[in-house]
Image (cartoon, helix red, strand yellow):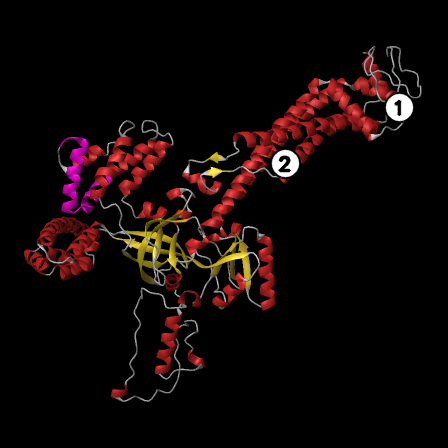
Amino acid sequence: MACLTWRGSLSSGLPPRRSGACPSATGGARLSLPCPSREESPVTLLSFALQSVLARPRSWVVGLLALGSAVLLTLGAAFVEGISEGTRRSIIESGTGHLQVYNSKSAEQPVVVMDSGGTPDLTPLPDYPALEAKLRAVEGVHDVVPMEVGLASVFRGNYLDEKLAAVRTVAREPASEARDARLARLTDDLEHTLRGVAGDARRRTEAFLGAEDAAEDKKALEAVTTPEFWQRFRAAPLESLEYLENRVARQAGEGESIDIEYLGSDLEQFPRAFPRFELVTGTMPPPGQRGLVLGHGLYEKSFKLPLATRLDELKREHERGATFADDERLRTLVERNGLELPDLLARLDVERAAALQAALARVLNHAGELEPLLREFLALDDDNFDARYKAFYAELAPHLPMYRVKPGDTLVLRSSAGLNSVPVKVWGTFRFKGLGGDTSRVNTLSALDLVTARHLSGRRTQAEKDEARRDVEALGMGGAEASADAELLPAAIVETEAPAKPKEEEAPRFERLQAWPETIAPGELRGGSVLQAALVLSPDASQEDVAARIDALAKESGLPLATVDWEMAGGFISGVVGMTQVVLLAFAAMLALFVVLVSAGTLLLLAQERVGEVGTLRAVGMQRREAFSVLLMEGLLLGGLGAGLGVLLSASLLRVLVGDGVSVHDETLQFFMGGPVLMPKLSGAASVGVVLGILAVVLAASLVPAWRGSSVSPVAAMRKRED
């Protein structure tokens, strides 16, 4: 294709139509242009668009917009991907596993972290021991952990319950002078406390005359305020304590019910399968024993002295930069500590109160009564908080009832439906290391042995089924119509012949099992019903491939099996990943709208300025669609170069500035970041997506300017050029 250099002015009208001759784009100027006398190739049009971009610096605004958008979106995508990966690791490593296997006939899907919907309705897996062996044989499966999720509650008594428990502990010690002296002091303090309870109860009785229970309560209180009762108490304290616990303690006020969300599992296998498991206090239950390991977050929040819990919260807020002078919430917490002082003082026995008073005198450097000293100590501000917080744990905490429950104590768990109650020993507390500390949601989960979890849910264990079968057979009621393995059915009248009455000396003797054995019978852990199982996969295994293999196993063996991934089993916590993605998409949409408006305005202004030039090119033979393509290519060049440079700049920033990750000091965010360090993750797919997205936006912004710029007729363009 020939190309000539054209000189001259366009003031006299259209130039002569000479094949291969191209007029200058500007009157009187000298510019080499591709000849539009015949259809141009895309390369030629692209070259012309590039020359036009380089000749007009104002058009670079579009490229700068594309660059800035690419930087923001690329960094955002990298951080969102890092949060998504961090949340995925946190959920998988905090007891969920990569996949959850359950019975496909279940009414609901399994979850590990429950939401307001409560415990899912699941059907037990068939023949779990055999099923576990098959699952372990699936390629990519590293471990199979039997599991059950549930909700229980425990009753926390009032201050009188605690004092009675302290007296009982001393009363059970071997007799000695020191023990007798301590028991005498605690007894005097208990008598004083009960006289106060009696006074409060009398006022309550006067306010509610006619209550049916008032007479019995009044009689019990009058009995414990007589000298005769305390003479009997000193002679036989354990018997009198039982009377006080059953008849009087409830009159000191109701206690508090604490919800415990638990993961029932094999407590020997669970810490091995999930390496983030970290024992904080106590020990794990020995193999073959029932037990409960409380989540340390729950332990600190619900079983710790409320005064200490609020001081811990003040410490966290103070470290984040909040001040008592500016933050009303901090001042409210301080006021609550003062309002609840009477309750704390009521919980102290005489020995603790004397030791606490002496400690306060040392800290405050002057003597005084216990309550005024404690109020002075708890008058906190920005100047004294750090010193007082340190002194609280160093000097005061040893003399306070810091925890209602300690490792070694026994709690009576009640099922969420309130139908079953099971005593279980507390062995210690644990947390999932690096996942948000005590404020993290997953660190409020407790670990319970699977057998106790079955007791709470009301499903019979194998030992109970065997005992029921022996009882049925001993009564002569064996057979298909009275299977011990059948589910419990509503009571009904059954007509049958009465069995022959055995001789008195031949009366059957039933061997009774211990009501709540501390140990677990061999094979009972996995031999009973199991509702779900967590699958921990090998590092190189694909989650989707393993799920497909399990589906194939279910079809091949006819087993009712189904799987859900970590995102479904994570419950509402995994929804945070979706929320961050939605936020990024919303930001991208707003940014795209801004880019479209600014880019379209810029390109439209430039197109209007180039009407004469485009008209001249049209006059000498350039087709309208070629002019449209050139103008469109200018926008794509600006958008493509800007987006590409933006992605490269973002990758460099991530490598240089956050190559080792971003430290996350806020414990409430650590779970979603996968630990105390967030690692942004920039994938190739995200980079390509950002570039293509920006190109699409700039393309949309270039359509109107290109259309309007190419639609001008040559005659009108030339006239405008002459004007």
Magenta stretch: dominant SS? helix
Task: Report which quarter residue 217 is drawn in.
Answer: bottom left
What residue is shown with label 2?
A: 687
Against 514, is 449 above or below?
above
Q: Which mark is residue 621?
A: 1
Residue found at x 39% / y 73% = 465
Identify which amino acid the numbered label 2 is placed on: Ser
Identify which amino acid the numbered label 1 is placed on: Gly
Against 56, is 156 above or below?
below
* Residue 404 visible in the snapshot: yes
Q: Position of residue 695 (x, y in %)?
A: 69, 32
Taking depth in this image into account, of 618 and 539 the one nearest to the observer is 539
Quarter of the image with the C terminus is top right
Count residues near mark 1 (Cα–Cα under 10 Å), then give few for <14, some for 14-19, many for 20+. Answer: many
Is mark 2 in CB contact (under 8 Å) with mark 1? Answer: no
Q: Position of residue 597 (x, y in %)?
A: 65, 27
Q: What residue range appears in magenta? A: 338-366
Against 123, is 385 above or below?
above
Quarter of the image with the N terminus is top right
Q: Position of residue 511 (x, y in %)?
A: 30, 77
